[in-house]
Image: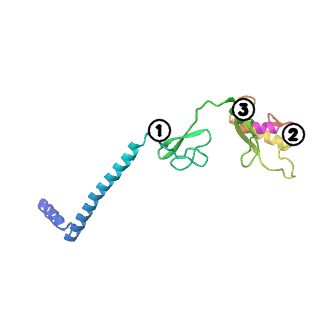
Amino acid sequence: MKHKLIMENWRRFLAESHSEEQEQDLKDISGELKKAVKMHQSQADRIDNIVNATPDDELDEAKNKDGKEQGADGKACWDGYKYAGTENGKDKCVKIEEDQDDDQLDEKKKKACKPTKGKASAKRVDGKCVSYGQKGKAKGGGSRVKPGTSKGDAYCARSYGDMKSHGKDCSGKDRGTPLCLSRQKWDCSGKYSRK
């Protein structure tokens, strides 16, 4: 009984699935899709011909106004880096591994550093600029850094705790960190600021 009912419903469904007018629309759509497939194949063939006709060593790489190679997003890599394709939809820049002349290295070391926004000072450490210290003046209009004062002692005590909790060694390898450079400017010795 159930089987007979299912078959009857199935026949009714097949008979009512679409009208003659809809059938003509479906045939038209089918024809359009077949033409689109031919058109896409033609476009793919033309692209392949262009790709195969140009030798890889003669390809023009996209360059910006400074002459740097651009990525897919139209942006160039940072100084010292070059474009190396895309990875997961993002441009990939890799460091340039060229032998630099001693003159270039000396020139880089001689160039003055500018402090970043909100920082008072900058110093070149191992060829890199390190910014440190809070920018601005004290309430009286003088220098914010006054070694040997109670404010200096408070800073040195606070930074001494930071130094110990972060495992910094200002007399050794961590000498060029912003924390150690600021302690040096405050003339800190342990938890106290010297005059």
Quadrant of residue 176 within the rendered picture: top right
Q: Amino acid at mark 3?
A: Asp
Q: Residue at x 87, y 49 (%)?
A: 142
Picture coordinates of residue 14, whole percent (x, y):
17, 64
Q: Nearer the viewer, residue 150 or 53?
A: 53
Quadrant containing the N terminus in the rendered view = bottom left
Give residue 21's position: percent from left, percent from top. 22, 71
Say left or right for 99 vs 119.
left
Gap in angstroms between the C-alphas marked 2 and 1: 66 Å
- Residue 57's tag is 1
Q: Which residues are magenta?
A: 180-186
Q: Choose the circle earlier in sequence order: 2 or 1.
A: 1
- Mark 1 burial class by Cα count in 10 Å: few <14, some 14-19, many 20+: few
Gap in angstroms between the C-alphas marked 1 and 3: 35 Å
Viewer-closest of 57 and 94? 57
Residue 159 sits in which quadrant? Answer: top right
Q: Nearer the viewer, residue 35 or 157?
A: 35
Eye-nearest disc, 2 or 3: 3
Residue 106's disc is 3
163 lies above or below 75: above
Residue at 70%, 34% (x, y): give it: 127
